[in-house]
Amino acid sequence: MSVDQGHVPVEAILARHTIVRAVYIAPVLIVGFGLLRGWEGAWASAIGILIVLANFWLAGAILSVSFRIGLQAYHAAALISFFLRIALLVGVMYLIAEIVEIDRLAFGISAVIAYLVLLVWEAVAVSRGDERELNWAK
């Protein structure tokens, strides 16, 4: 099954919107951990959030490319890349925590909170129809 080459990369748009929404969440987490755990907490929180944002960007890129290949590739990429991206997220976080002296509590909690809040926020926005830029008819 061939997919229309003029397809709007919906997945990339969703990932971009998710990343833009981090502008609201990141300062709260960074300042919060900065107040609770000092400069090390703020720095660790920022790194955790950046890793989560990279994960969302990677998801959008993988799904957009796989959709252009075909619907079967899209379905396979959606399932397989989720597990691979979670493994990559955990692996990168573990590697950073082992190599760099970092506030692990602020690092981990910020990443989990950012991931869950951004994921739920995007899901709610899509279900309410707030994603006006998306053209589902194409």
Image (tube, grey):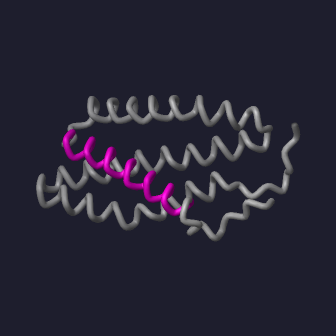
Residue positioned most to the front: 128
Q: 71 or 35, which is in the foreground?
A: 71
Q: Is residue 90 magenta?
A: no
Residue 126 sits above or below residue 84 on the image: below
Q: Residue at x 62, y 36 (%)?
A: 78
Q: How many marks?
A: 0
Q: Position of residue 101 (x, y in %)?
A: 21, 37
Residue 98 sits above or below residue 119 on the image: above
Q: Position of residue 112 (x, y in %)?
A: 32, 44
Horizontally, residue 84 falls left or right of residue 72, namely left
Q: Residue at x 40, y 66 (%)?
A: 23
Q: Position of residue 109 (x, y in %)?
A: 25, 45
Q: Residue at x 78, y 61 (%)?
A: 137
Q: Residue at x 18, y 55 (%)?
A: 33
Horizontally, residue 132 falls left or right of residue 44, namely right
Q: Dividing the image into 4 quarters, which one contains the C terminus?
A: bottom right
Q: Dividing the image into 4 quarters, which one contains the N terminus?
A: top right
The span shown in magenta is 104-126
Residue 52 sits above or below residue 71 on the image: below
Horizontally, residue 7 falls left or right of residue 52, namely right
Give the prevailing secondary structure in the magenta stretch.
helix
Q: Quadrant of residue 108?
A: top left
